[in-house]
Image (cartoon, rainbow, N blue to C red):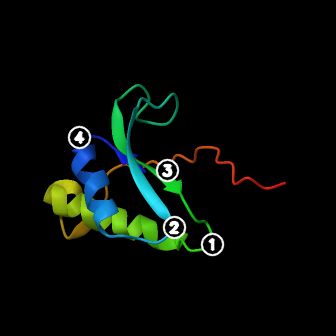
Amino acid sequence: MATVNIDVIRLANALNDLDLEGVVFRPIHFKPYYMPKKGIPHQGVQIHLTDPAKVVLTEIQFWFLQEAHNIDPSFILLKTGRTVTPCLIMYVAPIRFGLP
């Protein structure tokens, strides 16, 4: 999960401090090749599943938004009475689980 202009070390530490079961967050940096933000540096966290049976995947996006907002309150902006969320990119890296 990534966006522009956020302290990824603090974000990864904050998410890891939540002690969510089955998952560890690592800082990442990249530039998208496609989409409207093509070529713009993004940073965020890689979601590393340590125990897929224990992790609750659907909750991770909400923990990300909460901790990103705690680090930078302008992450979720209020403009003209509407909630506007900045571009959020989900990047899924291939993961091997040691299955036969």
Please tell me which of labels 3 and 2 falls first in the chain: 2
Q: Residue at x 49, y 36 (%)?
A: 35
Check whether the beta carbons of the residues at disc 1 and disc 2 lie within 8 A of each other. Answer: yes
- Residue type pointed to by label 3: Met
How much space separates mark 1 and mark 2, taking CA atoms? 7 Å
Tell me the residue that label 3 is attached to: 90
| Image: 64 above or below 5 | below
- Residue type pointed to by label 2: Gly
Identify the element where label 2 is drawn.
Answer: loop
Tell me the residue that label 2 is attached to: 22
Please tell me which of labels 4 and 2 falls first in the chain: 4
Please tell me which of labels 4 and 3 falls first in the chain: 4
Identify the element where label 3 is drawn.
Answer: loop
The location of residue 24, given as percent across then percent down, is 44, 57
How much space separates mark 4 and mark 1, taking CA atoms? 33 Å
Q: Residue at x 61, y 66 (%)?
A: 52
- Residue type pointed to by label 1: Ala
Q: Nearer the viewer, residue 68 or 40?
A: 68
Tag nearer the camera, 4 or 1: 1
Q: Residue at x 35, y 36 (%)?
A: 42
Tag nearer the camera, 3 or 2: 2
Tell me the residue that label 1 is attached to: 53
- Residue type pointed to by label 4: Asn
Q: Residue at x 42, y 29 (%)?
A: 31
The location of residue 48, given as percent across then percent down, is 51, 53
